[in-house]
Image (cartoon, rainbow, N blue to C red):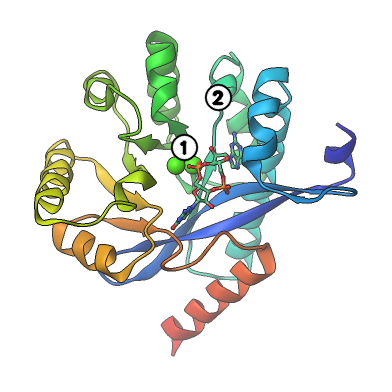
């Protein structure tokens, strides 16, 4: 609580690119903790703990608010509108006020809900299917865009899709850490094809090589996010990036 009040948590942004024209079309907000004694802390170190002690709900709301404030700031500066995704922890799903909290933040900055994408990890869908289906359905009705995070990392990915309607599938990064053999390329191709048949947009996450970017383009994947383009970066660096894109577009 003290760290939150002292603004020790920072929002980093990792760009998302549309693969067909390689335009920056969005970003994912990822939190970092600049600890006064321990220094820079990656989320893997503290998120699991905050999910256990319940603090994650507060931290997430802080990140959502900061993110909406940024979107509004860029809009005011006349940038091409982009959407930003935030992570919604499984703990947030159990909060009966989740939709109200999100709507309040959106309204505070006068944004359309579709500008804020909500990432919910695949495994959350299997833990409490009824609650999550109801929540996701409601959030979609309100206009939020739902991204299913870490798709393919669990055991029942397709089963989950049968029960829930989402907008974007984020293919888990483990898919792109393997060597792209002929057989594996076929498997990925059919996976992407199957998801497209279900009217889903597909984002590949954790893409590090040109080989995979080229492959994903030919396979019909929609978006890419990964170190091949950029690592998550502090705000000022991200701002420079969209500044540059605005220059290119007006040139
Ligand atoms: P995630 O939601 O799956 O986020 C993507 C992670 O993949 C990020 O790690 C990002 O830095 C990493 N990544 C992106 N591209 C590449 C790549 O090309 N190669 C590799 N090896 N990694 C890549 P990060 O930022 O350390 O975040 C880790 C996890 O912490 C996130 O996984 C998410 O589950 C959680 N997290 C981060 N920020 C928040 C937050 O604000 N709220 C909640 N609830 N969870 C968060
Ligand atoms: Ca995520
Ligand atoms: Ca992910």
Which mark sits nearer the N-terminus, 2 or 1?
Answer: 2
Q: Nearer the viewer, residue 137 or 187?
A: 187
Q: Position of residue 138 (x, y in %)?
A: 43, 22
Q: Quadrant of residue 45?
A: top right
Q: Position of residue 12 (x, y in %)?
A: 64, 55
Above or below: residue 175 compared with residue 216: above
Residue at the image point whose x is 32% and y is 38% from the top? 167
Q: Position of residue 104 (x, y in %)?
A: 64, 32
Question: Distance between the Cα atoms at labels 2 and 1?
Answer: 14 Å
Residue at the image point whose x is 45% and y is 19% from the top? 135
How crowded pointer 2 is (Cα within 10 Å; few <14, some 14-19, many 20+) is rated as some
Above or below: residue 181 compared with residue 53: below
What numbered label is drawn on residue 99? Answer: 2
Q: Quadrant of residue 122?
A: top left
Numbered disc total: 2
Residue at the image point whose x is 17% and y is 47% from the top? 188
Q: Quadrant of residue 190?
A: top left
Side (left or right) of 59 relative to 164: right
Q: Is residue 57 visible?
A: no
Q: Which is more foreground, mark 2 or mark 1?
A: 1
Within 8 Å: ligand 2 and the Cβ of disc 1?
A: yes
Q: Which residue is mark 1?
A: 119
Q: Is residue 249 visible?
A: yes
Residue at the image point whose x is 33% and y is 36% from the top? 151
Above or below: residue 188 compared with residue 180: above
Q: Position of residue 7 (x, y in %)?
A: 84, 47
What numbered label is drawn on residue 170? Answer: none
């Amino acid at each position: 609580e003290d760290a939150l009040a002292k603004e020790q948590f920072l929002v980093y942004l990792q760009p998302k690119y549309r693969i067909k024209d390689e335009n920056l079309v969005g970003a994912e907000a990822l939190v970092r903790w600049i600890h006064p004694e321990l220094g820079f802390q990656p989320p893997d170190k503290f998120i699991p703990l905050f999910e256990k002690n319940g603090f994650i709900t507060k931290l997430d709301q802080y990140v959502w608010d900061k993110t909406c404030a940024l979107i509004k700031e860029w809009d005011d500066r006349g940038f091409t509108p982009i959407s930003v995704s935030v992570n919604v922890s499984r703990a947030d799903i159990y909060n009966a006020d989740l939709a109200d909290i999100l709507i309040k933040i959106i309204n505070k900055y006068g944004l359309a809900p579709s500008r804020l994408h909500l990432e919910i990890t695949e495994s959350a869908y299997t833990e409490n299917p009824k609650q999550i289906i109801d929540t996701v359905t409601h959030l979609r009705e309100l206009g939020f865009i739902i991204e299913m995070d870490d798709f393919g990392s669990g055991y029942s990915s397709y089963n989950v899709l049968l029960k829930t309607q989402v907008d974007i599938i984020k293919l888990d990064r483990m898919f792109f850490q393997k060597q792209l053999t002929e057989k594996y390329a076929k498997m990925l191709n059919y996976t992407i094809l199957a998801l497209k048949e279900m009217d889903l947009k597909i984002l590949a996450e954790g893409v590090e090589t040109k080989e995979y970017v080229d492959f994903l383009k030919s396979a019909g994947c929609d978006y890419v996010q990964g170190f091949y383009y950029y690592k998550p970066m502090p705000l000022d660096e991200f701002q420079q990036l969209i500044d540059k894109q605005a220059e290119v577009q007006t040139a």
